[in-house]
């Protein structure tokens, strides 16, 4: 596993042994970030990764947040409650020399702390088929993480059903091998 593009391109990322952490594949990350940087979100929603504030919930190795930083995001906050994953996350942040532009919060993403400032992009990559996406989306919304322009990206298993809370709408969905990437935003036009 490595950073696909940007200033940290090619930098290897550590992943803990075992099946508890399932990082987003390089291929899926490359496809996802190509959509973010060159797809319709840039044009239709005025979305840009440059200087974005990013949330990487269920962070695991931190691959999504670190990829965003490598490609121009300003800051990444990682939510991760597993001790082993946080050790790996710390190691990957240090390897990318990104300690100044990151925060790690040791918390379950379904019980996030409140914030005063929304993020521009939120990645949610929970364990597949664990039923954590909907509770995490609701909790993050209620705790102030999402704004009218926040783009929310969820990774789920290819055959997994996603229950989208009624305050969000699905914008797009892509399949990459065993993964589905679903793009969400608040209902109605961006504010």
Image: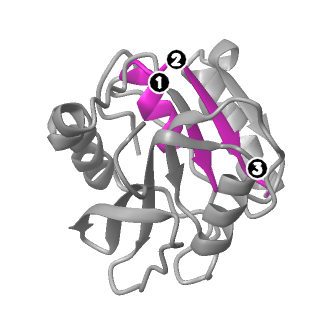
Q: Which residue is mark 1?
A: 52
Q: Which residue is mark 3?
A: 143
Please identify the quarter of the rendering in which residue 126 is found: bottom right
- The CA distance from mark 1 to mark 3 is 19 Å
Depth check, front residue: 150 or 108: 150
**Whether label 1 touches label 3, CB < 8 Å:** no
Secondary structure under the numbered disc 2 in the rendered image: loop
Depth check, front residue: 8 or 50: 50
Q: How is the image coloured?
A: one colour
Visible in this render: residue 61? no
Visible in this render: residue 57? yes
| In the image: residue 113, left or right of residue 100 | right
Q: Earlier in the sequence, mark 1 or mark 2?
A: 1
| In the image: residue 180, left or right of residue 144 | left
Please identify the quarter of the rendering in which residue 146 is found: top right
**Whether label 1 touches label 2, CB < 8 Å:** yes
Please identify the quarter of the rendering in which residue 173 is found: bottom left
Q: Range of the magenta residues?
A: 55-81
**Above-or-below relation of 147 to 70:** below
Dot 3 surroundings within 10 Å: few (below 14), some, or many (20 or more)? some
Q: Earlier in the sequence, mark 1 or mark 3?
A: 1
| In the image: residue 191, left or right of residue 106 | left
**Whether label 3 touches label 2, CB < 8 Å:** no
Question: x, y percentage for residue 58?
Answer: 64, 56
Question: x, y percentage for residue 109?
Answer: 72, 58
């Amino acid at each position: 596993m490595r950073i696909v593009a940007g200033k940290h391109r090619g930098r290897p990322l550590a992943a803990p042994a075992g099946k508890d952490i399932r990082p987003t594949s390089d291929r899926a990350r490359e496809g996802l970030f190509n959509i973010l940087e060159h797809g319709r979100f840039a044009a239709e929603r005025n979305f840009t990764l440059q200087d974005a504030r990013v949330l990487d919930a269920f962070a695991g190795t931190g691959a999504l947040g670190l990829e965003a930083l490598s490609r121009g995001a300003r800051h990444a906050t990682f939510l991760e409650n597993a001790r082993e994953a946080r050790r790996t996350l710390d190691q990957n942040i240090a390897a990318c020399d990104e300690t100044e532009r990151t925060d790690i919060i040791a918390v379950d993403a379904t019980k996030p702390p409140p914030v005063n400032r929304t993020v521009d992009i939120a990645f949610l990559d929970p364990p597949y088929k664990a039923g954590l996406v909907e509770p995490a989306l609701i909790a993050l919304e209620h705790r102030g993480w999402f704004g009218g322009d926040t783009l929310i990206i969820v990774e789920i298993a290819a055959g997994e059903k996603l229950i989208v809370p009624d305050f969000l709408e699905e914008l797009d969905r892509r399949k990459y091998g065993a993964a589905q990437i679903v793009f969400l935003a608040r209902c109605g036009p961006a504010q």
